[in-house]
Image (cartoon, rainbow, N blue to C red):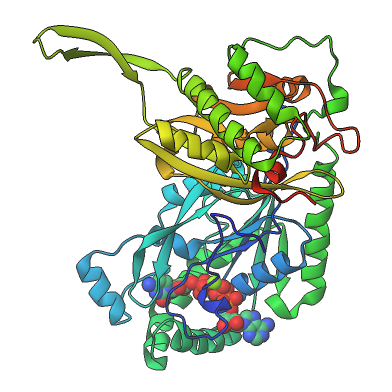
């Protein structure tokens, strides 16, 4: 599994391998490094949502995990309703420790937060899921960031209760397990994982869990599309469900459009004025010639890449929005000037973008930094996201996205999409590059018409061996880092 910001610790109590964890993360992610698909207009494809309700210890979490394991889909998350228990008042908490507080009434959950998280995920946005600790009956201070789910499984006793949540679910499942079996499993689980004693579990069950099941949970069976009797034991029903979800996903895949690739570009396509090319001074021309020259030695390649990077970064910073600022000069006179209108985040598209990050660090004193690692599939060239870590405040910043080359534009499209999913307005993004092909620029301009593209050189020499990889500089990262074969 690849590293991403959304790696979960998978410490859901019921999933805990050791069975000793007292903290539930209620989140599980399956990710082989592929981001949600995105369309040629730069939007994410619809996210498929599965709701799983049922009584406590009926097997909801276990069924959700089985579905995740069996679905051959890249990015799947399980969001558990347990994450959204409301914070208890001190007296309520005291009662909860004495097994005397009702935690099975629908009002125990924060539906506003549930809807926020599901809505973010439905729209392919990054989101933050609270964490809950059953042992202390309290939310943890930490939350979990998730980004990029193509399937979301939402499970919990009231997963099929709230009308707004119901509307979001593409398929609704109710797990119907015999109540004696549920009780036996709950005692075992709560003692092992949730810091309870058997008598306390029984007391809470008699007083709250069973009555609430009869009054509130069981009736939501009527909202289900599918009822799975016996939960995990019903492999036939689970398989049918998995086949159904796969078919639905295949259906939506049929509408997928790939990023606009090289062969969809025509030389008559006009590049728009969001493309800004570094003024071609003689110095710049000479440096570019050195970088394009296949005989240039690595030391020189590094030296001139660094030098050109500083120039292009300065030029990119020059495209950021300003606001007026008046200062007082040492002579005591007002001076009407400017300042950058917001904080700046530099987002490095690894690994080659690291070269430009070095340049940004040398000229911008107060920038924030983020990193994205996109790796092209060796066979299909499809870009795959392996890692994304962006500062949470990025949505309020102007963003310099840095990658030395834009060839097909596929990686750039994905990097921009990731910034948008983290709340950055499109017009706040400046994509900075040393070399871009007209095809790559055209792809970005078509998908994201307000992103500024700042480049040192527009060059249409694309390696013929592999249209999607090589540009006029060759493979920039390999030449810079000395990893050429
Ligand atoms: N079919 C099954 N056979 C045996 N144990 C099971 C089965 N399904 C679930 N369990 C166990 O029962 C407990 C409750 O299951 P869980 O999936 O956590 O239920 P829920 O999420 O509905 O509360 C867990 O400890 C789980 O490992
Ligand atoms: N502090 C808490 C919060 C909830 N519970 C019980 O958890 C049950 C829901 O989780 P399942 O995985 O079993 O669906 C619910 O029945 C609550 O009684 C708790 O014991 N303590
Ligand atoms: Mg559960």
317 up-or-down from 30: above or below = above
Q: Residue at x 42, y 79 (%)?
A: 22
Ligand 3 placement by image quarter: bottom right
Residue 320: give x, y in percent of width and height.
45, 20
Q: Nearer the viewer, residue 474 or 466?
A: 474
388 up-or-down from 51: above or below = above
Q: Nearer the viewer, residue 291 or 56?
A: 291
Residue 460: give x, y in percent of width and height.
80, 21
Viewer can see residue 211: no
Q: Residue at x 46, y 70 (%)?
A: 212
Q: Nearer the viewer, residue 25 or 471?
A: 471
Residue farthest to the left, as pictured: 332
Q: Quadrant of residue 349?
A: top right
Quadrant housing the N terminus? bottom right
Q: Quadrant of residue 431?
A: top right
Q: Residue at x 42, y 83 (%)?
A: 206
Is residue 44 shown left or right of residue 366? right
Q: Residue at x 41, y 86 (%)?
A: 201
Q: How many marks?
A: 0
Q: Nearer the viewer, residue 52 or 317?
A: 317
Residue farthest to the right, as pictured: 465
């Amino acid at each position: 599994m690849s590293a991403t910001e959304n790696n979960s610790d998978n410490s859901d109590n019921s999933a805990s391998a050791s069975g000793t964890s007292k903290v539930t993360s209620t989140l599980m992610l399956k990710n082989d490094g592929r981001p949600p698909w995105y369309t040629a207009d730069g939007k994410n494809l619809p996210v498929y949502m599965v709701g799983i309700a049922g009584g406590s210890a009926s097997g909801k979490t276990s069924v959700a995990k089985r579905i995740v394991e069996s679905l051959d889909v890249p990015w799947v998350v399980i969001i558990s309703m347990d994450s959204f228990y409301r914070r208890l008042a001190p007296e309520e908490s005291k009662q909860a420790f004495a097994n005397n507080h009702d935690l099975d009434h629908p009002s125990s959950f924060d539906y506003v937060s549930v809807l926020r998280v599901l809505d973010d995920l439905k729209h392919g946005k990054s989101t933050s899921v609270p964490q809950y600790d059953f042992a202390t009956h309290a939310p943890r201070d930490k939350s979990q960031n998730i980004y990029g789910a193509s399937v979301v499984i939402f499970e919990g006793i009231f997963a099929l209760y709230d009308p707004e949540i119901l509307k979001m679910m593409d398929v609704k499942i109710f797990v119907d397990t015999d109540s004696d079996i549920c009780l036996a499993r709950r005692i075992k689980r709560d003692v092992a994982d949730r810091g309870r004693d058997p008598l306390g579990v029984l007391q809470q069950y008699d007083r709250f869990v069973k009555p609430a099941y009869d009054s509130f949970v069981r009736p939501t069976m009527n909202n289900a599309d599918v009822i799975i009797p016996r939960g995990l034991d019903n492999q036939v029903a689970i398989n049918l469900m998995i086949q159904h979800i796969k078919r639905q996903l295949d259906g939506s895949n049929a509408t997928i459009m790939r990023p606009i690739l090289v062969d969809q570009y025509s030389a008559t396509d006009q590049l728009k004025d969001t493309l800004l090319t570094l003024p071609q001074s003689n110095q710049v021309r000479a440096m570019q010639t050195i970088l394009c020259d296949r005989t240039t030695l690595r030391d020189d390649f590094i030296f001139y890449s660094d030098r050109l990077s500083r120039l292009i970064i300065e030029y990119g910073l020059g495209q950021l929005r300003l606001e007026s600022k008046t200062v007082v000069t040492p002579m005591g006179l007002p001076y009407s000037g400017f300042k950058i209108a917001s904080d700046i985040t530099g987002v490095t598209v690894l690994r080659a973008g690291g070269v430009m990050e070095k340049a940004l660090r040398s000229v911008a004193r107060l920038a924030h930094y983020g990193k994205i690692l996109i790796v092209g599939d060796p066979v299909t060239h499809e870009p795959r996201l392996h890692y994304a870590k962006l500062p949470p405040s990025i949505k309020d910043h102007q963003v310099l996205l840095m990658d030395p080359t834009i060839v097909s534009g596929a990686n750039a499209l994905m990097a921009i999409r990731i910034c948008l999913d983290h709340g950055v307005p499109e017009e706040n993004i400046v994509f900075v590059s040393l070399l871009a092909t007209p095809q790559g620029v055209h792809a970005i301009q078509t998908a994201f018409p307000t992103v500024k593209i700042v480049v040192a050189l527009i060059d249409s020499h694309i390696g013929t061996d592999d249209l999607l990889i090589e540009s006029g500089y060759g493979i920039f990262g390999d030449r810079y880092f000395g990893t050429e074969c």
